[in-house]
Every structure is written in structure tokens, then in C-alpha cells.
Amino acid sequence: MRRSTLIFLALLALSTAAVTVMAGGGLISTSFVKTLGMTLCLCLAAVAMDLVWGYAGILSLGHMAFFALGGYMIGMWLMWARTEAIVVQALSGQPLPPTAEEIRQGIGGQIFGVVGTSDIPWIWSFAHSLPLQLLLVVLVPGLLAAVFGWLAFRSRVTGVYLSILTQAMTLALALYLFQNDSGLRGNNGLSGLQNLPGVSAPQEVTALWLFWASALALAGGYLLAAWVVGGKFGSVIRAIRDDEQRVRFLGYPVEGFKLFVFTLTAVIAAIAGALYYPQAGIINPAEMMPIASIYLAVWVAIGGRGRLYGAVIGAAVVSLLSSWFTGGRAPSIPLGFYTIDWVDWWQVLLGLAFVLVTLLAPKGIGGLFR
Amino acid sequence: MSALLEVRGVSVSFDGFRAINNLSFAIDRAELRAVIGPNGAGKTTFMDIVTGKTRPDAGDVIFGDPPRSLLRMTEAQIARAGVGRKFQRPTVFEDQSVFANLMMALNAPRNPFAVLRFRPTSRHRDQVQDLAEEVGLAPHLTRVAGELSHGQKQWLEIGMLLAQDPLLLLVDEPAAGMTLAEREHTTTLLRRLATTRAVVVVEHDMEFVRRLDCRVTVLHEGSVLAEGSLDHVTADPQVIDVYLGRG
Ligand SMILES: Nc1ncnc2c1ncn2[C@@H]1O[C@H](COP(=O)(O)OP(=O)(O)O)[C@@H](O)[C@H]1O
Ligand SMILES: [Mg+2]
């Protein structure tokens, strides 16, 4: 194993332990634990982005679509199971025990009332089952990525055209989900996801569980990515990034490699999303708008692409700073004639940082080490 | 025994311009062949067609034993069938070590899942070591290819071709940018290689071609103008016309 991988895992374990201790001692709030857990999920998505862009050279600007799809898939079960418990509770006062059909109707009315129906869309067929819905977390984004990638790579769409195509994909998906009859509650999205069904532990405890799960997922994803890029496979995808035609003349099926990396990273992003949204509590189609995926690319660029720890640093630093600046905690700067309000000016600062890193440190923050 | 490579009546046009015009010729299994011709004669395009980079408008390209048409195969399939190519300017992966470059080229299963599971054994390492020695890069195995001199990059690329162990080797202007000593080394190597496989060398430099001492095909405007020994073709009035006419 490479030294940087070991150092990364050690640091991750240390910070996880530190957060756990501080949360137990009441030094950090539950909502901050959630913020940190979500940050770990974003770091995992950034590792996936680094794999597909930094190593294989495929600038996907649609990977947050897979992230959000993963969130939707787990969200469906969370919402269903919790609503079911509420409905059963409400009907328990009646003289006769409720039939399965009555419970279904109750759930349908509760979940889909906001979009003016109580019919349960067919895509919710598996929502009652956690194992099936967990399978969908992997299968739905994985299949979408495989089909999209197969079509795009087979036609040898590369470079900026591929980036535009991935943007179109995530935009189309978002616009579709914004519709009320998409089956996923339109712009309302799914909510109440922070309540884990069947768990009576309070939020400060479940927040830690999800934080640990996120840390574990990041460690696993990082190890997997390090293994993938560590051997000859890593050599080949970096070669594809630098000169794919040359790689073809070496006899490697370039399209197959791209498709593999694209699909694998989509699944990693989906798993990250499935852990993120229970901590965020809510998901809606705006999460899939192209800007989210552009941010992901910006984090990786700032952190340093082609280095897994660079991606993690970029995602952690930028997303934590972002929530600090936009959370109203950063003090405004009065200039007399004008007051710099960070909620608005953070974007400008981020844009500036991006330009500066691109110009002055093209290898990103991660490139400053070694 | 049939030829290893047979090009039959191949034509290709770029925006109405015929770069290759009804080109036909054949290469034997263990043959060294030089292809010469003025700039724009279609030499590189011919290599593009054989390696699958460019699809011809007409004709057929037959290769191997049993003979198969290359026209339905992808670049990667053609490479795996045994066609190796050395580019005009050295193309190695500058970001990676000499070792990684050679290891990538080494004959081994090429599909993503096999590559993912691949871990080099001591046999693979020995093979890479031998190749590096053969092309004079043994002391540089751990260096990043981008740091090598122009000549060393040419050698690395030749080493990668040897690692692929192709049946047919297409070499585009190998002497460009090489010192006299390197050229001599290159001709020796190419001639030795041609004892076990077919080697086609595209070259401008007549001195280099003379040293190769092999059959020569002269291309002009996308077709064969003359073929035979170097003395034979250089005595051909048409060939003289083409070279002098272009000045
Ligand atoms: N992709 C292409 N598009 C347009 N014209 C091309 C292309 N490739 C080659 N040509 C033209 O075809 C002719 C033959 O080119 P080439 O095979 O490179 O010649 P050579 O290698 O013999 O110097 C040239 O006139 C060149 O301009
Ligand atoms: Mg040429």
C-alpha cells in the first residue's frame, strides 16, 4: 500500500475518533456532526470524480446526478417506512385492525398528497424493503451510467462534447423530476429523511452513526480507488487520458476502460449520496442541477486532480468553507460605503480561488505536498 | 504461402482529395520493406489505414494467418492481431515511468477486468528488464518518460513495440532526430527484427534506406510508382521526375 494511503486512513481514523469524543462531550453540536458527516460523503464523491476525471481524463459534469439518484433511492425507503409506521399508529385506534390495502392507501395519501394524488407510482414498488432499495442505490445509477457511457464512448464522444453531454443528462433528469407526475413528488422532493425508521435513538446518536458510516464509506472508497489506480489499470487509464489513440494501438479496448471507470465512479457517487441525504434530511431535484456537478469538478481541481488525497482535501476545505460562509457565521465586513456580505461574496471568492489555483498551482492544493 | 499483409485496390479521399488512389501491394512474413515517396505521397495515410485509424472508401486490407480483413476490426483488435506501429514523432506516455510504459506494452490480456487483476510477476519484470537492456534504457527504468532525450524516447517507443511482439511492424520515419550512431543502431535492430517478422519502414532519408538494404516501394500521389531494389527504383526516370519535380 502506498504511504499516502496509509497516512490518509490514519488521519481519517483520528478525526473520526476526535469528532466522536467531542460530540460525546457536547463540544460540537449535532448539526455540526451532520455537516461533517455530509462533508465526508462529498469527499467520497470527489474521490469518484478524481478517478473519472483526474485519472481517466473524462471530465464528467454530471456525476452529482448519480449522487442524488443514490439519495433518492435510499430516501424512498426512509420515507415509506416512516410513513408506514405513522399510518399504522394512526389506524390503531380503530376497532378493527387495518387491512394491508388500508395501510397502503394511507401511505399513498400521506406521501403523494402534496402532488395531488394518493396513487402509489410503480417506481415505489420496492420502497417497503430496505435490502431491495439498497440494491437500487447501486443498480439505478449504475445502469444509467452504463447505458449513457456506452452510447457516448462507443460514438467516441470526447473532451468538451462529452462534458456538455453529461451536463445535458443531469439537467434532463432534474427537469424530469421537477414534474409532479415524475413519481418522486416533483419539486417537493423527499423529506424527513433524518428519521431512521424503527430506531428510537435520538438524533445526536443517529447523527454519529451516520457520521461513522460516512467515514467507513470514504475509507472503503479511497482504498478501492487507490487499488484501481495503483496497478497496471491505473497506468492504462492515465495513458488514455494523455493519448487515447496511442493506447488503442497498444491493443487496449479504450471504450471498455472508459465505460468501466465511468460506471464504477457513478456507483461510488451513488453510495456517497445514499449516505449524504439521510444526514441532510431532504432531497429535491434542485440537487441534480448542473451546477452541483460543476462544483464537484471545481473541488477536485482546487484540491489537485490525479491525486486521491487532493480530491479529498479540495472537497473538505471548499465545502466546509462554503457552509461557514453561506451559513451566516462569517462576519460581514463593513467598508463604510459598502458591506461585504459573505453569503453573496463567497461565490466570488470561490471563483477567484479557482482561477488562482488554475493559474498558479495547476496541480491544486494536493500538488503542494511532495 | 500467401503474403502476411495484402493491400488490394485501396482508395481514400479527404474532402474530395484522393490521398490514397487504388493502392495495391503485399508484404511477406519475414520481410523488410522500405516505403519512400515525396511529402504528401500518402505514406502516413497508408499506415493509418492498416492500423484502422482511417477507413478506406474502397478496397480491402488482408492480414495474417488465416487471412482476415482488417477493415471490420477496431484499432485495438488490429493491434492485438499483431500489427504494431511506431509513430513519426515519438509517442510515449510522458507522465509515467519507463517501466510502466514497457509494462503496459508487454503482451498480456488487454480487457479491463484482466488488467484490473493484473499484478506483475517476476517473469514480467524480467521481460521488461530484458527489453530495457535491448533498447539501452536499463539504467532509466524508474525515470519518468517525459525526462528522456528525444532519442531515448524513440528507443522507448521501439522497446514498447518489441514488448507487443507484433507480426507486422510499421515504422514511420524512425531516423528523424537521431544521431548518426543512433541511426546505425536503428538499422541494425530493424534488420534483425525483420528476420522473424515483417517490418515496413517509411523513410525520407535515402542514406538510411540504403543501409537497410531491402526492397523499396515508391509511393506517389497515393499509388505505387515503382518497386524493387533501391538502385533499381532510383534509376527509374519516373521516380527521378517525381523527386526532382518536387525539389
Ligand atoms: N485527416 C486528413 N484530412 C485531410 N487531409 C489529409 C488527412 N490526412 C492526410 N491528408 C492529406 O493526404 C495526403 C497524404 O498525407 P500523408 O499520408 O501524411 O503523406 P506522407 O506521410 O506521405 O507525407 C496529404 O496531402 C495530406 O495533406
Ligand atoms: Mg508522413
Image (cartoon, coloured by chain):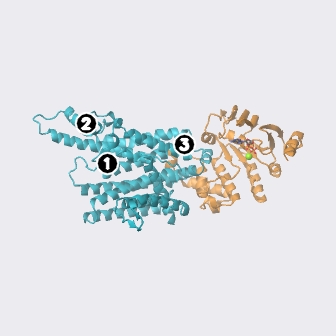
Look at label 1 and name its amino acid.
Answer: Ile
Give the percent coordinates (x, y) of residue A20: 29, 62
Q: Gap between marks 1 and 2, in whole Å?
A: 19 Å
Q: Name the residue under label 3.
A: A255
What letter labels the chain drawn in orange? Answer: B
Q: In this view, does B102 lie to the left or right of A201?
A: right
In the image, is residue A39 above or below residue B213? below
What letter labels the chain drawn in cyan? Answer: A
> Nearer the N terminus, badge 1 or badge 2?
2
Query: Can the viewer see residue A263?
Result: yes
Which of B135/B9 is in front? B9
Residue at the image position 67 percent from the left and 56 percent from the top:
B153
Give the percent coordinates (x, y) of residue A138: 38, 43
Tag of residue A108: 2
Report whether the residue tagged 3 is closer than 8 Å to ligand 1: no
Residue at the image position 87 percent from the left and 39 percent from the top:
B238
Look at label 2 and name its amino acid.
Answer: Gly
